[in-house]
Image: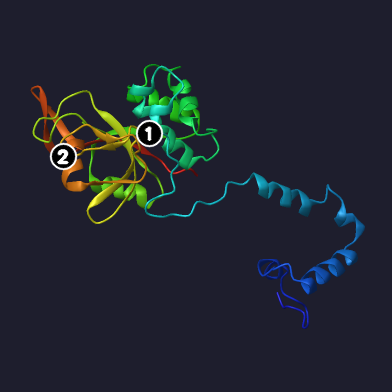
Amino acid sequence: MTQEPGLLPDIVPFFEHWKGLPLQRAAVQQFWEAVPASLKKRDASWYQTWQGAGKQEQPRTLSNPLQVPYYSQRDSSTAHAMRMCFSSSCAMLLETLKPGMLKGPNGDDTYLGRVLRYGDTTEAPNQIKALAHYGVTAHLDQTCTPADVKAQIDKGIPVPLGCIHKGGLGNLHGDGHWLIAIGYDATNFIVHDPFGEMDVVNGGYVNNWGARLRYSFKNFCRRWEVLPSGNSYRYAPGNGWAIIAQPIT
C-alpha cells in the first residue's frame, strides 16, 4: 500500500519519545481538539484497548541473580516457623513468577495455609498442588544437576533446592532443608535461604538472615547432590532434589 506523500506514517513514535515538554503538551492538546467527539467517548474501542493494558502482566527483566523477594521462615506467625523452609522457598518461587499473589512480608504464611489444605508442609506433592492452585505448573526432580539449575535461572525461574544442612561434609545427617537458588556465578549458587546463613562446610547456621547468599558449588553440592548411605549421605553428582517450574505463558 502506497503512503500518501506528506502524511505522517504513525502516531506511536510521538508517544515513545514523550518527555512532557511544553510544546509536546501543546501539540497533543491541538490533536485532541481535532479528534471527533465519537472518539472521545469512554466506550470508544481505542479507549477500551488502552484500559485493558493495565491488566496485562508486565514482562520481567531477566538478570543474574534474579529479582526474587525474600521470605524468612523464622518470622512466621504460625506454629510451623521452624519447619516451613519448603513452603517459604516455594512461596518465593511463586511470588517471582506471579508477583502480587502473596501480600506483605509474611506472604509465605499465606502460601503455607494453602499447602496445609493438601497435607504437611514437608511433602513435595503438597507443594506441587499449592503451586498449581496459584497457576504455576511444577514438578519434583530428584536427578537435578547444577547445569539444570543454571538453565532455569537463565529462563528467569528461581529453583527451590532440597539439601542436607546438619553435620559436616563427611557426616551429613538429618531430614533436610529447602532453600531457593536465585542466581549463580563462576563458583557459587546465589541463594535465598529462609532459615539464615548456612555453614556449608560444618553444618548448622551462623546467623538468621539468608538473603542473596553465595554457597559454593564445591561445598553446597556435596549437601545437595546426595543419596542415603546407612545413617548418613554420600555425594552422588546428578542426584539433586529441586522443584522445577515451567515458565508462565
Image location of residue 63, percent across then percent down = 41, 55
Crowd tier of the residue under label 2, counting other residues whose Cα lies within 10 Å: few below 14, some 14–19, many 20 or above: some
Q: In screen coordinates, is 105 left or right of 196?
A: right
Q: Quadrant of the N terminus?
A: bottom right
- Discs 2, 1 touching: Cβ within 8 Å: no
Element class at badge 2: loop
Residue 196, image quadrant: top left
The residue lying at 36 percent from left, 49 percent from top is 153
Of labels 2 and 1, earlier in sequence is: 1
Kindly identify the amino acid type of the residue bearing the numbered disc 2. Answer: Val
For the point 48% across and 38% down, the residue is 95
Identify the residue position indicated by label 1 in the image.
89
Residue 174 location (% of width, % of height): 19, 23
Percent x, y of residue 87: 39, 28
Query: What count of labels does the image hold?
Result: 2
Secondary structure at numbered mark 1:
helix
Q: Is residue 172 left or right of residue 50?
A: left
The residue pinned by badge 2 equals 201
User: Is 88 situated above or below 18?
Assistant: above
